[in-house]
Image (cartoon, rainbow, N blue to C red):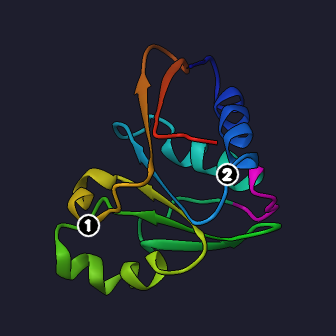
């Protein structure tokens, strides 16, 4: 899919979020400034939350309540291995009936379930983005 603006990115993600079933793990990959948090914002909106979605870079995880699900939004940018990952409480969250959104998932890929939705966001030019979605079986 091609998004021409942050608002279009939010709308694409919102559409996906409205169709998600729990539990689900969604990974978000893309370079710095590609729109991962913008996409997460749309997913959370699509899941029925009106909460303000911000980057969890320093908190490592932000928790939101959707209309049907708990949503855990992780940023793994500074997570470099098993012990860092364990310190976030990630494995406890993974065992819950919830939606997990994981930015910078490539840092922890070996610890993620095979059954997941992978989303890659590629910066094209200006605000234009190519959004590739893998593993979405809705």
Residue 29 is a magenta residue: no
| 52 horizontally vs 110: left or right | right
- Locate residue 129, reporting x and y percent: 51, 22
Where 84 sits versus 131, above or below? below
Q: Looking at this view, is 118 or 126 the one in front?
A: 118
The quadrant of the image that shows the N terminus is top right
Query: Which residue is drawn at the image coordinates 64% and 42% (left, top)?
Result: 138
Q: Residue at x 73, y 38 (%)?
A: 15
Marks 1 and 2 sit apart, C-alpha to C-alpha, by 22 Å
42 is higher (above) or lower (below) than 4: below
What segment carries the magenta color? 46-52
Asked which quadrant contains residue 31, the reply is: top left
Q: Closer to the N terminus: mark 1 or mark 2?
A: 2
Relative horizontal placement of residue 56, taking residue 86 as reference (left or right):
right
* 49 drawn magenta: yes
What is the crowding at mark 1: few (fewer than 14 residues within 10 Å), some, or many (at least 20)? Answer: some
Residue bearing the label numbered 2: 20
Residue identifier under label 1 = 111
- Against 92, is 5 above or below? above
């Amino acid at each position: 899919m091609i998004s021409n603006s942050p608002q279009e990115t939010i709308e694409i993600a919102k559409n996906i979020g409205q169709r998600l079933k729990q539990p689900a793990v969604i990974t978000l990959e893309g370079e710095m400034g590609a729109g991962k948090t913008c996409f997460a914002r749309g997913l959370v909106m699509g899941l029925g939350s009106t909460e303000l979605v911000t980057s969890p870079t320093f908190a490592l995880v932000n928790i939101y309540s959707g209309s049907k699900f708990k949503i855990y939004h992780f940023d793994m940018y500074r997570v470099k291995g098993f012990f860092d990952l364990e310190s976030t409480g990630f494995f406890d969250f993974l065992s819950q009936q919830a939606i997990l959104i994981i930015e910078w998932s490539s840092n922890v890929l070996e610890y993620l379930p095979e059954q997941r939705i992978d989303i890659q966001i590629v910066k094209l030019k200006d605000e234009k983005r190519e959004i590739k979605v893998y593993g979405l079986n809705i």
